[in-house]
Each structure stands twice: as structure tokens, then as C-alpha cells.
Image (cartoon, grey):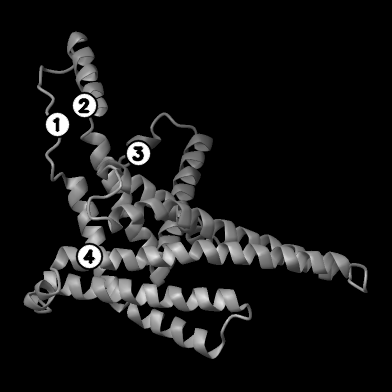
Amino acid sequence: MADPEYPPDSSDVGKTPAQSLCAKRQLLAALTTTDVTIRRLNLLLSEANGQERVLATVNYVASMLHYLTASAPWIALQTRLGILARLKGHVASKNVTPSPSKSKLMALSSLASETRYNLRLFGLLPLWIWGVETLKSPPADPIIHVLTVLQVISNVIYQLLENVGYLASKGVVSKRFVDKYGGLAKWDLWSTRGWFGHIFFQFFVLWRQSVLRRQRLAAQRAAAGTGETKETRAEDSEALRLEIRAWRKSLVNNTFWAPLCLHWSVEKGIGIPASLTGLISFCAGAWSLHDCWAGTASVKA
């Protein structure tokens, strides 16, 4: 007879010992999975690149969902579902109204975007290091060397103008100084043009890397059979695979950003609707997000 002060758990009533044990194992497995996921997310957020990727994902996905839920097809679908539910007598009659222009999703997107602006205030530091390392140890290929220098200059223009414009919008830097040279809109426009310069030159970097890789592989094939071991060939094959993967990843990123950045670099844009900017931006960084998350796979409970 059960002790009245300690009644049996209602969840265990009617269950065999085997079923109860199975349920506990499932609960333990769920808790373990949750623990590992949180640990992986914590590791991801402990690095600057991981923080940027997570914040960018929140920024873009929230923007996508905002425009999706405010779109005419979505509202029409909601209306039809509401009519069907009323016909079946499941819910009371209620008018479906479009989401307000400043929805909670757009507020979340704006918050993530502003957080990224704050973090990029320190963006000139890694650019300084990139520039110094390029001067100290320039790329062996003269064409890539010139392109890298141009990219450093473009990124410095982008980051410097963005920082000054953003700080002026927050009252940290004198807004009169910014207005004297065109105003916040002009500074933002030229900042984006600096970013577009980096993307433009990156296409030439990728082209040159492809040419050099083909030349190197042709030379290796010509010298094949000169004492190479299976281990050496396997290492070279893996290194080549990783090199090509990184090249393709950069190409995909650049291809998505190029039209969007060009759109923002022109005063009246090139016709890309605001409802698509979140989707295009997300696609540009999706591969990088996947790699960042995959890099935390070694975390155990």
C-alpha cells in the first residue's frame, strides 16, 4: 500500500517498469542533447566570428519573417484559414489585420543590426593588422599583392566612414562635422561603396587564385612519379580539397553580396526590394554559419 504522504507519480501510473525506464532514458537523452547544444552555442558565441554569424542570422531571419508575415499572400492565407476555422465552429469570428510596419520581428532585426554596428566599431583593429601583415609578408604573386592592398584600403574606407557616421548618429561625434561633408546619408553611401570595392576586387582575387591553382596542378602532374609516397599524395589531395572548398565558399559569399551591395551603393538602388534583402544576406553567410557550427561538433556533455 502506497504511503499517503508520498503518492506515486501520476506519470508512472499505468506504466510497466520497462516503460518507466524507457521514459526516463528518453528524458535523460533530451537533457543531454540540450546540454550539448547549449555548450556548443556558448563556444560559438565565445569567438568574435561566431558572435557575428549568430547576430547576422538573427538580423536576417527576423527581417525575412517580418516581410513574410506582412506579405499579401500570407495575410490571404491567414484569412482563408480563419474562414475555414469559423465554418467548422472552432473559433469566434475575428478580423485579420496586417502586421504593423514596425513589428516585433523588425524590432528584433534592428536590435541585432545595431549590436553588430557596435561590435564593428573595433573593426579597424584587424584591418590594421591585415595591412601590416600584407606589407611585411606580401603575397608571392604580384597581382594578388596589388589586389590585397586595394582591398585593405577599400575596407578601411568602409569601416572608418561607417564608424564616424554611426557615432555621429548617436551624438558621440559632432553631427555638424558630418553634415559639413554631405550628411549621414552620404557617409553611409560612401561607406557601402568602400565595402563594394572589397567585393569587386575579391572577384579578381578568386580569378587569380584559380589561375595559379591550375598552373600549380599542371606542374605537379608533370613532375608526378618522382618519389611521392601514397601518404604525400593523400595529404596533397586533402589540402587541395580544402583549398577548393574555401575558394567556392568565398565565391558564393561574394556572388550573393555583390548585387545587394551595389544596390546600397547607388542612391536610388538597382531595384532590389527591401523584402528580399534579408534573404539574400542570409544566403551570403549561410555557408560560414554552417562551418562555424560544425566547428563546435567536438563539444561533449
Q: Which residue is the extreme one toward the bottom?
A: 136
Find residue 133 and name its label.
none
Mark closest to the chain's N terminus, 2 or 3: 3
Amino acid type at circle 3 is Ala
Closest to the observer: 178 or 43? 178
**Mark 2 and 1 residues: CB-CB less than 8 Å, in contact?**
yes
The quarter of the rendered structure image containing the N terminus is top left
- At x 43% / y 63%, what residue is drawn? 199
Amino acid type at circle 4 is Asp
Mark closest to the chain's N terminus, 3 or 4: 3
| Residue 49, picture quadrant | bottom left
Left or right: 256, with 239 as reference point: left
Label 2: few (<14), some or many (≥20) within 10 Å?
A: some
Mark closest to the chain's N terminus, 4 or 1: 1
**Mark 4 and 1 residues: CB-CB less than 8 Å, in contact?**
no
Q: Secondary structure at mark 3?
A: loop
In the rendered image, which residue does mark 4 sit on?
Answer: 188
For residue 87, say whether it is visible: yes
Across and down, in percent, residue 214 comes to 72, 63
Is 30 above or below relative to 214?
above
In the rendered image, which residue does mark 1 sit on?
Answer: 98
Residues at marks 2 and 4, CA–CA distance in whole angstroms: 34 Å
Residues at marks 2 and 1, CA–CA distance in whole angstroms: 7 Å
Amino acid type at circle 1 is Pro
| Residue 118, picture quadrant | bottom left
